[in-house]
Image (tube, rainbow, N blue to C red):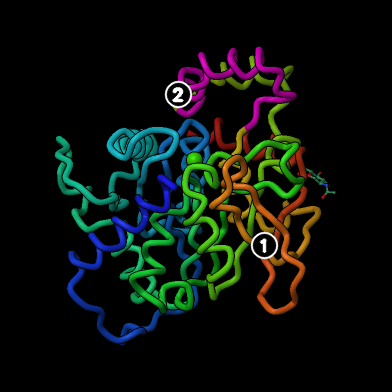
Amino acid sequence: MYSTMKLAFLVTFVAVLQGGLSSPLSTETLQPTKFLVVDTDGGIDDTLALLLLLQNYDKTPILSITCLFGNTDRRQACDNVLRILALADRQGVTILYFVGSYQTNSGQQFSRIPAALALSKLSRQYPGAITLLALGPLTNLALAHRIDPYFTHNLREIVILGGNYNGILTGIEFNFEEDPLAANIILTEAACPVTLVPLETTTKNGIPWDLYPELAKTDTRFGHFFGRVSEVQHIRERQRGDPTYIVYDFVAAAVVLHPDIVTAEEKRVLAVEYERQFTPGTTVVLDTMERKPVRIVTDVNGTAIVELFRRMLNSM
Ligand SMILES: *[C@@H]1O[C@H](CO)[C@@H](O)[C@H](O)[C@H]1NC(C)=O
Ligand SMILES: [Ca+2]
């Protein structure tokens, strides 16, 4: 209920801010090169995903990064992204944040346009060329979709780290749980292809614990950073009994950059529970042929994930 109200409020707010929409497609049409836009909630695994993406920046440019609440609040998420950009010497990437105002010392990297408007605008500027990688709750995407009916038509693809397909015994995935209504809107209404990298796929393709100490000691800029950001977290996850050091968002980024890393997938018509008392955020399979199915990545090449991770840490 909280998320429902939050989304309803923000739709109103953004609609007022926005004024009006112009034509559905921008006049300038670019080559169908693959551009990336990343929507992130600034967690540790978001950081690892961004480092991988920034390492590949020359081949797959990131047009923009949008931030939102989730693993942390929006402000901290923006700060974290700024640190990552500085670490990777990529300060030029524009960060567009959620609604509200926020001052930062490094000023012009921040746009003051709300993320949902920015997403809509970018999709019109590069119709059919943008892969949108969603690493946090789907709030920004759902807002963009609500204020711009052509938004998802103009995207090449949406890749989402989120959801679980094994039913309630897996537990509800964090991003979908944070804003189940937004997740349902995107999974049931998006016009472009949607790929889900669900919880189960990430938990079975983590970094084995016996490799962790060595990787956390990688003597590079990225390596030192990884050692620091995972220092406390890895102890907690080990104590919790996680089978490996799970890198969640990193797996979704790897799927975007290396589509052949996918070893198993299913296509299902999905929805997300958002009104029940105990299960908001649960992904459910609908028994219908009347809607376009979502592609669920059910497994990836775990060896390749570890290799990419190691290469990422050694790249800089
Ligand atoms: C998985 O990745 C490794 C390392 O990149 C590669 O050697 C292996 O052939 C891949 N396996 C499959 C099934 O694709
Ligand atoms: Ca995240």
Spot occupied by residue 136 in the image (x, y as percentages of width and height):
47, 45
Position of residue 268 relative to residue 129, above or below, is above
Give the crowd class for mark 2: few <14, some 14-19, many >=20 residues within 10 Å: many
Asked if residue 179 lies left or right of residue 122, the reply is right
- Answer yes or no: disc 1 within 8 Å of ligand 2: no
The amino acid sitting under disc 2 is Phe
- Extreme-front residue of the structure: 277
Give the residue drawn at x 77%, y 48%: 299
Q: Which residues are magenta?
A: 222-246
Asked if residue 73 lies left or right of residue 224, the reply is left
The image quadrant of residue 146 is bottom left
The image quadrant of residue 303 is top right
Which numbered disc covers residue 241?
none
Along the viewing direction, whichever of 86 and 66 lies nearer the viewer: 66
Give the residue drawn at x 45%, y 52%: 57
Spot occupied by residue 10 in the image (x, y as percentages of width and height):
29, 56
Q: Earlier in the sequence, mark 2 or mark 1?
A: 2
Give the residue drawn at x 16%, y 45%: 101
Q: CA distance from mark 2 to mark 1?
A: 38 Å
Instruction: Give the residue pinned by disc 1.
Output: 270
Give yes or no for residue 168 being in the magenta stretch.
no
Quick one: SS at disc 2? helix
Quick one: SS at disc 1? strand
Spot occupied by residue 87 in the image (x, y as percentages of width and height):
37, 33
Asked if residue 283 lies left or right of residue 34, the reply is right
Spot occupied by residue 69 in the image (x, y as percentages of width and height):
37, 41
Give the crowd class for mark 1: few <14, some 14-19, many >=20 residues within 10 Å: many
The amino acid sitting under disc 1 is Leu
Give yes or no for residue 238 being in the magenta stretch.
yes
Position of residue 164 relative to residue 124, above or below, is above
Instruction: Give the residue pinned by disc 2.
Output: 225
Along the viewing direction, whichever of 11 and 57 lies nearer the viewer: 11
